[in-house]
């Protein structure tokens, strides 16, 4: 990479995908907004000049369809949700420097100016295309007014996206077997003139752009296949009257507006501009971030743009990678704006192992979480430190409880409280002693871990650097037992507690991006002035105030009875919503009527089996899975985890440490020597402080370990 490590001497901007202004927020949405907020805060702890901006996506057919169903004006409909989002985000400590919306004057003017520039440079042309039309409603059908089948994978598709299958962007006319959502009748295709952005002209540029792109691997790798398959030019107009008008277009009676994915990402620029105008360019200059300084759009490489402009980072859901890693940088390049430095695409959220479903109320809603009385920082910690940023995260109240009780209450909170309470009772604050060399080096190590994690776009690493430091603190105080030293070795006791108070302060500084309120509470208990959010990593080694008041406990344990209540409440909601949906099953497919089905004696009972997935993968996708024959060498339970075991697995080339949920299902003492099957190219994950480098494959609820029938060698690849 040519990009310098953070912090740089260039201003940065962090953005997240715009929420459609058409419904309640749930934790699936919050993962991205909290993640981007935590990353922005992390940059600030490094001393990076940065701004965190976003806005509500007011346009597009989702908003228009829902507004029409409610019989209200789409602008009024969207603005109502926009105002609700502005109230909700701060409740989860999501601190935008600016939160606008796509229908405001700034975004409208910028969008039309950028499209006008692309048109003047010859990147936009007009073409007759097939567009879905509903003869009964006598209107053309843009995007989500039409449903049908994806031409690439055969999954159900909605208008402009195969959101249930391959997640490809779909152009007007591509959906097969189109049906109108207005009347429910089959649609027909008719010729219609639309504007196209010549994305295909940017293939070489985009390849180079992806070569230097930072962030998550899925944001770099998925778009390469689309480029190799041949980029299709992008239809940027729609048959609607809700959106931003094509610039300088004469009123010819047609309801043609710019496609929502044209003006939506431009809101990133518009929101940054609004922030700059509010605080002044001497504080933050939006043009320094987004505009080229001496690097032309036609001659500057992506690396040269990164060096000349600001550091732009997008944190998005993985279902909109194509829009951000193909269309958006091509549009920026054509219009003379800077390319993003990094794109980090998050995985999805599942609930109790099943896909999140708003129609079946299988979701943890933002308002619901707050109404249950949980602190927002608990959810922030769970969402940012459970799995890597691009991995799917399963939410259950049991897993939430385990994470909170084990890491926040048992490790961080326990260390904070016992250290500060001992310091207060024995020294009325920080003892007069120097920090030991051991502790100084350990804090410096945690600072280095944090710095490295931020530059790797690893929020889990940011959170765990703080948690591991607190774990070290617990071990340190337990090892030195200062309560035994106060009478016999008072100077040694003071030294130990001085170290512990310093560790406590350092943990607070490091944890602030993930849990800002709780870190501020600690900051105040230490008697520190100001806001911990303004502290930099180096402040973790600055001496705490000499005196402070008696501390209080910052985290409370979540009891089993509370979890049982919440789980039961969620299940009741899901069951009620599912019964309202009639005969639809959880996966969205219609259940078959098996009244007359006959099952032979040797057939498995399929009633309790998970349904087969409709989505198929290609052979090339399968080949990307590196599945190996392994042999378990060691197996032991992980302390504090009910179900998890640590395994050492020989896969021929090396021995891998793997965490598996088999502690209660297998006699661990009998496992060494057992052959197994290991998915070797899984991204590393950390569970209960133990790193897992692979996944053991097993079948069913009893975790029947997969193995080989013959004499396959250890390390052989499964094909």
Image: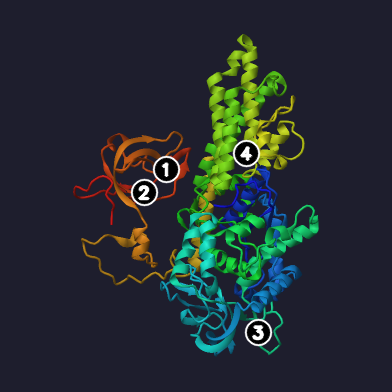
Residue 681 on image: x %, y % = 39, 50
Question: Split into 4 quadrants, where in the image is the C terminus?
Answer: bottom left
Residue found at the far top of this picture: 488
Position of residue 352 relative to residue 420, above or below, is: below
Q: Secondary structure at mark 3?
A: loop
**Which mark is drawn over residue 510?**
4
Q: Position of residue 674 (x, y in %)?
A: 26, 41
Mark with earlier residue (2, 1):
2
Q: Which corner quadrant of the image does residue 103 belong to?
A: bottom right
Which residue is disc 2 drawn over?
A: 680
Separation of residues labelled 3 and 2 (CA atoms): 53 Å
Q: Residue at x 54, y 70 (%)?
A: 202
Displayed quadrant of residue 652: top left
Identify whether 693 is placed above or below 174. Answer: above
Q: For mark 1, what is the residue? A: 692
Asked whether the beta carbons under mark 1 and mark 4 sit within 8 Å of each other, the answer is: no
Mark-to-mark CA distance, 1 and 3: 55 Å
Count of numbered circles on the image? 4
The answer to whether 235 appears left or right of 696 in the picture is: right
Helix, strand or loop at disc 4?
A: helix
**How much space separates mark 2 and mark 4, taking CA atoms?**
32 Å
Secondary structure at badge 2 equals loop
Distance Cα–Cα, label 1 vs label 4: 24 Å
- Residue 235 in the image: state x and y as whole percent: 57, 78
Task: Indicate which disc, 1 or 3, sits on the residue closer to the N terminus.
Answer: 3
Q: Earlier in the sequence, mark 3 or mark 4?
A: 3
Separation of residues labelled 3 and 4 (CA atoms) = 52 Å
User: In the rendered image, which residue does mark 3 sit on?
Assistant: 255
Decide if residue 680 is on the left or right side of residue 466.
left
Upstream in sequence: badge 2 or badge 4: 4
Residue 578 picture location, percent across and down? 48, 64
């Amino acid at each position: 990479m040519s990009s310098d490590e953070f912090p740089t001497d260039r201003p940065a901007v962090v953005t997240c995908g715009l929420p459609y202004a058409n419904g309640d927020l749930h934790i699936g949405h919050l993962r991205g907004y909290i993640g981007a907020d935590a990353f922005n805060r992390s940059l600030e702890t490094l001393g990076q000049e940065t701004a965190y901006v976003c806005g509500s996506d007011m346009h597009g057919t989702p908003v228009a369809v829902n507004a029409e169903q409610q019989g209200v004006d789409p602008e009024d409909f969207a603005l109502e949700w926009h105002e609700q989002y502005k109230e909700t985000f701060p409740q989860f400590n999501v601190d935008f420097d600016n939160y606008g919306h796509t229908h405001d004057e700034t975004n409208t003017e910028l969008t039309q100016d950028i499209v006008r520039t692309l048109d003047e440079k010859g990147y936009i042309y007009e073409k007759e295309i097939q567009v879905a039309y509903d003869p009964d409603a006598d209107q053309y059908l843009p995007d989500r007014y039409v449903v049908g089948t994806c031409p690439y994978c055969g999954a159900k598709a909605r208008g402009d996206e195969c959101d249930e299958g391959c997640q490809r962007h779909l152009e007007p006319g591509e959906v097969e077997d189109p049906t109108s959502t207005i009347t429910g009748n089959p649609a027909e295709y008719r010729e219609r003139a639309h504007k196209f952005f010549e994305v295909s002209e940017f293939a070489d540029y985009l390849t180079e752009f992806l070569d230097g792109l930072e962030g998550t691997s899925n944001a770099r790798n998925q778009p390469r296949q689309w480029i190799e398959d041949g980029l299709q030019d992008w239809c940027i107009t729609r048959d609607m009257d809700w959106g931003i008008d094509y610039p300088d277009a004469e009123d010819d009676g047609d309801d043609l507006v710019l496609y929502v994915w044209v003006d939506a990402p431009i809101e990133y620029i518009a929101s940054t501009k609004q922030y700059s105008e509010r605080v002044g360019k001497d504080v933050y200059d939006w043009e320094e971030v987004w505009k080229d300084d001496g690097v032309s759009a036609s001659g500057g490489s992506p690396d040269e743009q990164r060096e000349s402009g600001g550091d732009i980072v997008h944190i998005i859901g993985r279902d909109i990678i194509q829009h951000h890693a193909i269309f958006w940088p091509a549009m920026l390049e054509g219009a003379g704006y800077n390319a993003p430095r990094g794109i980090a695409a998050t995985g999805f959220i599942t609930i109790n192992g099943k896909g999140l479903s708003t129609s079946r109320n299988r979701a943890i809603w933002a308002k619901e979480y707050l109404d249950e009385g949980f602190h927002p920082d608990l959810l922030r910690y769970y969402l940012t430190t459970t799995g890597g940023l691009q991995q799917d995260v399963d939410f259950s109240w049991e897993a939430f409880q385990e994470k909170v009780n084990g890491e926040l209450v048992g490790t961080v909170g326990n260390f904070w409280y016992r250290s500060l309470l001992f310091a207060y009772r024995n020294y009325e604050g920080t003892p007069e002693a120097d920090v030991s060399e051991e502790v100084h080096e350990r804090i410096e190590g945690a600072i280095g871990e944090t710095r490295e994690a931020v530059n790797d776009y690893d929020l889990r690493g940011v959170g765990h650097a703080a948690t591991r430091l607190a774990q070290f603190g617990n071990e340190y105080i337990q090892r030195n037992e200062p309560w035994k030293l106060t009478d016999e070795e008072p100077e040694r006791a003071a030294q130990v507690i001085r170290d512990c108070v310093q560790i406590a302060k350092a943990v607070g500084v490091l944890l602030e991006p993930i849990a800002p309120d709780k870190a501020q509470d600690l900051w105040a208990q230490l008697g520190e002035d100001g806001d911990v959010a303004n502290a930099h990593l180096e402040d973790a080694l600055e001496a705490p105030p000499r005196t402070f008041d008696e501390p209080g406990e910052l985290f409370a344990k979540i009891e089993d009875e509370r979890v049982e209540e919440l789980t039961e409440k969620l299940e009741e909601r899901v069951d009620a919503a599912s019964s309202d949906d009639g005969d639809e099953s959880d996966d969205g497919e219609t259940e078959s009527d098996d009244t007359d089905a006959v099952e032979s004696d040797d057939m498995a009972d399929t009633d309790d089996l998970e349904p087969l997935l409709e989505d198929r993968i290609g052979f090339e996708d399968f080949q990307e899975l590196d599945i190996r024959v392994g042999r378990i060498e060691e197996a032991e339970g992980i302390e504090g985890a009910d179900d998890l075991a640590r395994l050492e697995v020989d896969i021929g080339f090396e021995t891998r440490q793997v965490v598996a949920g088999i502690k209660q299902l297998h006699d661990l003492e009998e496992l060494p020597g057992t052959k197994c099957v290991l998915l070797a190219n899984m991204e590393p994950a950390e569970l209960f402080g133990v790193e897992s480098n692979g996944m053991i494959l097993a079948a069913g609820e009893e975790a029947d370990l997969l193995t080989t029938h013959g004499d396959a060698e250890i390390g052989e690849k499964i094909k």
